Image (cartoon, rainbow, N blue to C red):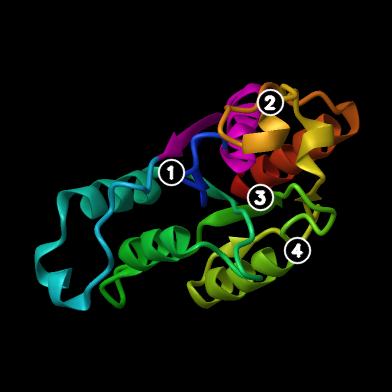
Amino acid sequence: MKIIAISGSLRKGSFNSALVRELVKLAPAGMEIEQVEIGNLPLYDSDNEANFPAEATALKAKIAAAAGVIFVTPEYNRSIPGVLKNAIDWASRPYGKSAFTGKPTLVMGVSVGKVGTAIAQSHLRTILLHLNMQVLGQPEIFLGPAMELFEVSPDMAKAFSEVPGALKDDATKQLLTTALAALAQKVA
């Protein structure tokens, strides 16, 4: 089964994008996870719905062909990043032609703080439920502090410009494995 993963962060050193890379490694047998890029999408403008940009068309096609979707979001100003909302808007438009309808969906996020993107995920779940996605309620995955979960260099703590290394926390790996199994069951 093909699963699309969308990271809501464009930052080179993103812990959320690092989390997507870990999900690819932890995918159960029979599940293939592909991270799709959303940074190349133009800003959503309903005037362009009749002539969709190629980037938005490609995103919609990948989502439509997938068995499920994983959203991995940081929390910006107590909500989801604009780039993630932009991607959701493109893939769900025009009205009545959403690529998301009925898709089993897993939501998670990682933060450098202890709150672990809880508020952003709450906002995201509201949007996804409106789009008639089958959002898994459990397990909830609010991860943080990221510096304790991933391999990082001392320099990264200062600048956040380096790409984080592998996930080093075994309990987190087990939680992610459980979540991916739940998504696989929902898809089946």
Q: Quadrant of residue 100?
A: bottom left
Residue position for label 1: 66
Quick one: SS at disc 2? Answer: loop
Which of 62 and 123 lies nearest the eye of the viewer? 123
Q: In this view, does 104 lie to the left or right of 169?
A: left
Asked if marks 3 and 2 touch (Cβ < 8 Å), the reply is no
Verify whether residue 179 appears in magenta: no
Question: For the residues marked 2 and 1, what is the alpha-carbon distance in whole angstroms?
Answer: 38 Å
Binning the other alpha carbons within 10 Å of mark 4 as few (below 14), some (14 to 19) or many (20 upward) gives: many
Q: Is mark 3 on a helix, strand or loop?
A: helix
Name the residue at the right extreme: 171
Which is nearer the N-term, disc 2 or disc 4?
A: 4
Mark 3 surroundings within 10 Å by alpha-carbon count, few (fewer than 14), some (14 through 19), many (20 or more) = some
Mark positioned earlier in the residue sequence (4 or 1): 1
Q: In this view, does 144 lie above or below 173?
A: below
State the mark number for residue 118: 4
In contact (CB < 8 Å): disc 4 and disc 1: no
Q: Where is residue 176 in the image (x, y as percent from the top left)?
A: 76, 37
Q: What stretch is highlighted in magenta?
A: 14-36
**C-alpha gap between disc 3 and disc 4:** 23 Å
Marks 3, 1: nearer the viewer: 1
Q: What element carries label 1?
A: loop
Q: Name the residue under label 3.
A: 186
- Tell whether position 22 is magenta: yes
Q: Earlier in the sequence, mark 3 or mark 4?
A: 4
Q: Which callout, 3 or 1, points at the residue further toward the start of the chain?
A: 1
- Please give the label number shown on residue 155: 2
Assign a secondary structure to mark 4: helix
Instruction: Give the mark toward the camera: 3 or 4.
Output: 4
Mark 2 touches mark 4? (CB < 8 Å): no
- Residue at the image point whose x is 62% and y is 36% from the top: 159
Q: Which of 65 and 123 is in front in this view?
A: 123
